[in-house]
């Protein structure tokens, strides 16, 4: 391409006089996107031996670090890390995983000793999709999936590994202590309920437990033969403690006023500390509050992702829609909050992000749909607007940092992020509304978000954009409601659920069965492939070559149909990466083509 067309000066090009406003300035765009995605992730994992363990993307890739609290010395433990086990206070060991297949999510496990800094690869564990790893101070448990089966492994700090259980059911290890691994899963074959399991390492017994048939139970944390978990057995989600000795179920003391006042929708996370005191993060309308040992821990408005009590100090991972991730240090006596790691955005970028606001709107059937709207601080209303569709689908947009949302808004768009039916954070009844109906009611909620944006004078032109399940919704929305959109950007999307099922590993086959409640006839009915001839809006398709969750193959077939039908589209295939965006550079590769396309289609 001709370099001259990128310059901001008045230029002569093919004898045509072009002025500033006609010229797309790619370098400015790129700088904004880069500065947003470079804002590093900081995420506290735990505290042990007077050191904070944390994950950061400060150097461009997800890396595992420690910081010595006494002298603030930092040491990098590992690069290119996918996940990290919990940390046990008093033990120097932790387990982390790395993708060894260029994004295909085939992981290997590694053990690191944070005192000696020695590391070992768990060599007897063949690469597999590791879904979770946990630690009790003596041994690790992991859950994983292969092409054909899901399984549980025990791994010792000497890096020896032993498979202890396998089954073709959806289940995840959450915690372990002594001879028990506890976890969660869809263990009764009912896609709308979730049970707990207690696996006995000595006897091999896999015991399924639910306080009430049909309830959703999750995140069991074990301490001194009691498990703390969240359950909907008694209505709205509650935290309960079960004594594994006598099976007695009690509710931890939460009658304190501050807790009752907030009417939370759900819990984000919770655990025991090493003395058996409980902390939890509760969420309401996309914002959280943290409680520890019955007391509210005062933190800025936004979203706390994780909390680590460590004696005199507490540590928390915190962010908001307009403020990137930080690790906060809280003084337990004074309550004073300081930023230990992380920085604010430069002012010019912060101002572009304008303000974010939670609201609800009515969908086609009268259901109230929660959403966030973020208005760009420099364009007027109505202006070009993006309907951003989150992934999952059991996920949500909260008042927490999201580099895609921030990049879009800073690039000159208003943005509406609907938490369509099926989203988490608004109670289990709401979450379950997409089960058996993906691409049905949830799609209409997204369409009604676009109507809201038009009716409320926010949107001039309107595009739909999403990644993964959000990419799926983009493909489907642009063919089922073709007149609603001026453009669509589908990242890592799904065009054909039938082919996706055939290409999926054991975990994702179970996932699809759950989402569709086994209704195989729905797979084609809810695929954009079946309606491709309806497409009107130009489409920008961005997909990683090595994606093993939403593989590229069916998308290439869709593109071939677009070509035959003479539809307007562009296709960007990104090599050497998979579904998960691990590197800062990869985030730019995904976002830049999307934003250039949107500028062309929405701002012309
Ligand atoms: P994601 O979307 O959770 O947003 O990454 C999905 C990816 C894969 C599948 C479903 C949703 N799947 O069933 O394979």
Image (tube, grey):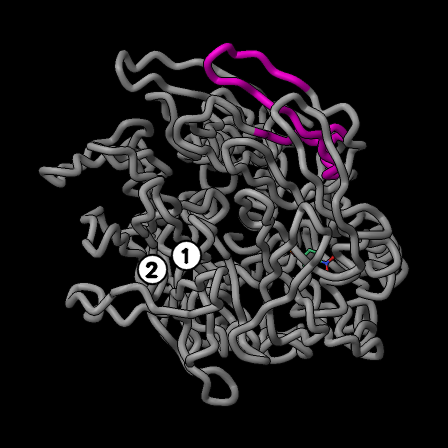
- Residue 55: percent from left, percent from top: 47, 29
Mark toward the start of the polypeptide (1 vs 2): 1
What residue sits right under mark 2 in the picture? 282
Would the CB of label 1 be found within 8 Å of ligand 1? no
Q: Is residue 411 left or right of residue 261?
A: right
Quarter of image, ligand 1: bottom right
Q: Around disc 2, counting alpha carbons within 10 Å, would you say few (fewer than 14), some (14 to 19), or many (20 or more)? A: many
Q: What residue lies at 53% left-to-right and 28% top-to-bottom?
A: 94
Q: Is residue 238 left or right of residue 482?
A: left
- The disc at residue 268 is 1
* Disc 1 to disc 2, C-alpha distance: 6 Å
Q: Is residue 468 left or right of residue 367?
A: right
- Across the whole image, how many numbered discs are drawn on residues? 2
Question: Which residue is outermost to the left?
Answer: 334
**Taking 366 as reference, is 312 above or below it?**
above
- The disc at residue 243 is none
Q: What residue lies at 30% left-to-right and 61% top-to-bottom?
A: 357
Q: What residue lies at 49% left-to-right and 59% top-to-bottom?
A: 386
Q: Around disc 1, counting alpha carbons within 10 Å, would you say few (fewer than 14), some (14 to 19), or many (20 or more)? A: many
Q: Which residues are magenta?
A: 95-120
- Residue 269: percent from left, percent from top: 41, 53
Q: Locate residue 176: give its quadrant.
A: top right
Q: Is residue 5 magenta?
A: no
Q: Are marks 1 and 2 in contact (CB under 8 Å)?
A: yes
- Depth check, front residue: 308 or 604: 308
- Depth check, front residue: 533 or 69: 69
- Depth check, front residue: 216 or 484: 216
**Residue 235 visible in the shown view:** yes
**Residue 446 visible in the shown view:** no
Q: What residue lies at 34% left-to-right and 68% top-to-bottom?
A: 251
**Taking 222 as reference, is 50 above or below it?**
above
């Amino acid at each position: 391409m001709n370099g001259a067309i990128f310059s901001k000066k008045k230029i002569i090009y093919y004898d045509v006089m072009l002025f500033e406003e006609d010229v797309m300035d790619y370098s400015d765009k790129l700088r904004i996107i880069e500065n947003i995605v470079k804002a590093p992730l900081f995420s506290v994992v735990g505290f042990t031996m007077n050191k904070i363990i944390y994950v950061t993307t400060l150097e461009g890739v997800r890396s595992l670090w420690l910081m010595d609290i006494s002298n603030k010395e930092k040491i990098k433990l590992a690069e290119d890390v996918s996940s990290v086990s919990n940390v046990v206070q008093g033990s120097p060991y932790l387990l982390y995983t790395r993708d060894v297949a260029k994004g295909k999510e085939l992981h290997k496990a590694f053990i690191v000793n944070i005192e000696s800094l020695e590391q070992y690869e768990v060599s007897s564990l063949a690469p597999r999709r590791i879904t979770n790893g946990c630690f009790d101070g003596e041994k690790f448990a992991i859950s994983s999936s292969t092409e054909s089966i899901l399984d549980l492994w025990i791994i010792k700090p000497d890096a020896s590994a032993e498979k202890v259980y396998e089954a073709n059911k959806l289940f995840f290890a959450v915690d372990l202590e002594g001879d028990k691994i506890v976890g969660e899963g869809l263990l009764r074959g009912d896609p709308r309920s979730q049970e707990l399991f207690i696996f006995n390492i000595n006897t091999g017994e896999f015991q399924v437990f639910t306080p009430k048939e049909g309830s959703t139970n999750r995140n069991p944390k074990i301490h001194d033969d009691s498990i703390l978990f969240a359950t909907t057995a008694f209505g709205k989600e509650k935290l309960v403690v079960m004594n594994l000795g006598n099976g007695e179920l009690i509710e931890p003391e939460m009658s304190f006023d501050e807790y009752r006042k907030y009417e939370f929708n759900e819990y984000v996370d919770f655990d025991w500390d090493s003395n058996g005191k409980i902390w939890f993060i509760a969420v309401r309308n996309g914002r959280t509050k943290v409680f520890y040992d019955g007391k509210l821990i005062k933190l800025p408005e936004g979203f706390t992702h994780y909390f680590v009590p460590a004696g005199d100090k507490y540590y928390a991972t915190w962010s908001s829609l307009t403020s990137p991730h930080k690790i906060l240090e809280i003084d337990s006596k004074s309550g004073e909050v300081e930023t230990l790691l992380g920085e604010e955005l430069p002012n010019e970028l912060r101002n572009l992000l304008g303000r974010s606001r939670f609201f609800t709107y009515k969908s086609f059937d009268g259901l109230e749909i929660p959403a966030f709207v973020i208005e760009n601080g420099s364009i007027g209303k109505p202006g070009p607007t993006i309907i951003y569709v989150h992934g999952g689908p059991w996920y949500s947009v909260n008042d927490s940092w999201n580099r895609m949302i921030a990049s879009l808004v800073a690039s000159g768009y208003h943005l509406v992020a609907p938490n369509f039916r099926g989203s988490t954070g608004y109670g289990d009844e709401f979450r379950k509304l997409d089960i058996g109906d993906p691409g049905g009611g949830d799609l209409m909620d997204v369409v009604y978000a676009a109507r809201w944006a038009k009716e409320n004078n926010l949107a001039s032109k309107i595009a739909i954009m999403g990644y993964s399940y959000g990419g799926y919704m983009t493909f489907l929305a642009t063919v089922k409601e073709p007149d609603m959109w001026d453009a669509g950007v589908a990242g890592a999307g799904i065009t054909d659920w039938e082919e996706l099922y055939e290409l999926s590993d054991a975990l994702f086959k179970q996932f699809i069965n759950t989402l569709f409640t086994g209704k195989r006839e729905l797979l084609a009915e809810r695929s954009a492939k079946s309606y491709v001839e309806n497409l009107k809006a130009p489409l920008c398709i961005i997909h990683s070559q090595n994606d093993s969750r939403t593989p590229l193959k069916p998308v290439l077939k869709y593109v071939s149909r677009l070509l035959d039908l003479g539809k307007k589209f562009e296709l960007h295939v990104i090599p050497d990466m998979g579904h998960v965006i691990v590197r800062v550079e990869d985030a730019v590769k995904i976002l830049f083509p999307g934003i250039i396309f949107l500028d062309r289609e929405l701002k012309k």
